[in-house]
Image (cartoon, rainbow, N blue to C red):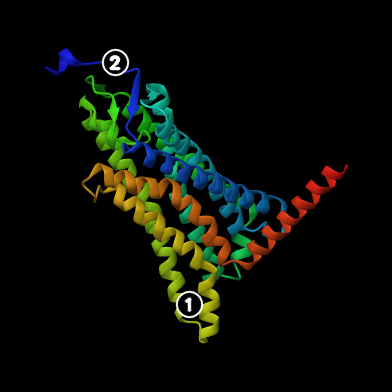
């Protein structure tokens, strides 16, 4: 029966968040404002790290890269979500869907960057004398390139196997972007290999960076506990508290999504929306609120930009 119904799909229909028209408009405005705010704050961080000499340090290189990644990531997912609130049906071509999924899978790059940032904190707290020797600009660039390369490689492998599955007529994806779970829901043949590859690669890109992060923080906690004064302990912990908060938020959302801990697809879509939109919004706030150096640099960058704008306007 399946062989008779095999279809070559040219496009998918994204269901998004089907609800009443007034709520669609409200959600559109909410996500649009959030999207613009996320773009603004992440671009400000990228610009600030780029132009401020005092921030040309390993941790801020990673922070700038993270902000750039999240700007790219949210620009892939949110515009299509916003289109879903305005247009019905919200369609996406098969090639567009695979490209969509390719860039969404770059979340794996974030896992690697978080692990690299944890290693940076480990070196700074546990081996402070060796820190400037090991954590050079060249080594940081190597870690960043490795994060992007591994993310792209894993994403390409996942997209290849997903694109080889067989569909049988149904082209409606119960999601607001092209993710593996809703895609596999409309597959009827030859999906076991794609599902296994996705699972194995998810384990590789999630578990190993996660273990690396946990091990780094185990050594960090051990080193902090050996500091004799409470003031010294707090000062050491404050240097990694922001990163630890981001790690907890990131992996909590990922665990919910990857393990399908929530059976309802609508609930999964809500968790995905939080992970896709609100986590990139919180990350820069978390880093900046606890970091006086970043806050001062942002104020200086904004003041210089405003002065430059006023000077150009007067001229």
190 relative position to 139: left or right = left
In front of the other: 56 or 16: 16
Quarter occupied by the N terminus: top left
- Vertical relation: 63 (above or below) 228: above
Quarter occupied by the C terminus: top right
Q: Who's the residue at 67% across and 56% down the image? A: 56
In front of the other: 11 or 20: 20
Given the current orientation, which residue lies at the most extreme top position? 4
Tell me the element at label 1: helix
The label nearer to you, 1 versus 2, is: 2
- Crowd rating for badge 2 (residues with CA inside 10 Å; few <14, some 14–19, many 20+): few
Tell me the element at label 2: loop
Q: Position of residue 67 (x, y in %)?
A: 55, 49
Given the current orientation, which residue lies at the most extreme front position? 22
In front of the other: 252 or 32: 32
119 relative position to 94: left or right = right
Q: Which label was assigned to residue 234?
A: none
Residue, disc 1: 224
Q: Position of residue 265 (x, y in %)?
A: 25, 42
Q: Who's the residue at 35% across and 50% down the image? A: 254
Residue, disc 2: 8
**Does residue 152 appear in this view?**
no
Give yes or no for contact between labels 1 and 2 (Cβ–Cβ under 8 Å): no
17 relative position to 305: left or right = left
Q: Who's the residue at 33% across and 26% down the image? A: 13
């Amino acid at each position: 029966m399946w062989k008779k119904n095999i279809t070559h799909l040219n496009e998918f229909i994204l269901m998004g968040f089907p609800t009443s028209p007034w709520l669609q408009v409200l959600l559109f405005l909410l996500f649009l404002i959030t999207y613009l705010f996320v773009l603004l704050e992440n671009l400000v961080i990228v610009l600030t790290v780029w132009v401020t000499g005092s921030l040309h340090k390993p941790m801020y290189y990673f922070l700038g890269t993270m902000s750039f990644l999240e700007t790219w990531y949210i620009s892939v997912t949110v515009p299509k979500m916003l289109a879903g609130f305005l247009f019905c049906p919200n369609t996406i071509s098969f090639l567009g869907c695979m490209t969509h999924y390719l860039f969404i899978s770059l979340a794996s790059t974030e896992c690697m960057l978080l692990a690299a940032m944890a290693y940076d904190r480990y070196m700074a707290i546990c081996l402070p004398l060796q820190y400037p020797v090991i954590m050079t600009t060249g080594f940081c660039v190597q870690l960043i390139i490795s994060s992007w390369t591994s993310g792209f490689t894993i994403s390409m492998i996942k997209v290849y196997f997903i694109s080889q599955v067989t569909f049988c007529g149904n082209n409606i994806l119960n999601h607001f972007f092209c993710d593996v779970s809703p895609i596999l829901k409309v597959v009827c043949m030859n999906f076991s290999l794609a599902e296994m590859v996705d699972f194995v690669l998810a384990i590789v890109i999630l578990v190993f960076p996660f273990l690396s992060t946990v091990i780094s923080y185990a050594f960090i906690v051990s080193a902090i506990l050996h500091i004799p004064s409470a003031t010294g302990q707090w000062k050491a912990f404050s240097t990694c508290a922001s990163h630890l908060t981001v790690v907890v938020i990131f992996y909590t959302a990922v665990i919910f999504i990857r393990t399908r801990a929530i059976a309802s697809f609508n609930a999964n879509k809500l968790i995905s929306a939080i992970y896709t939109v609100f986590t990139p919004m919180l990350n820069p706030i978390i880093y900046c609120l606890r970091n006086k150096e970043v806050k001062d640099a942002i104020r200086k960058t904004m003041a210089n930009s405003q002065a430059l704008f006023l000077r150009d306007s007067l001229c």
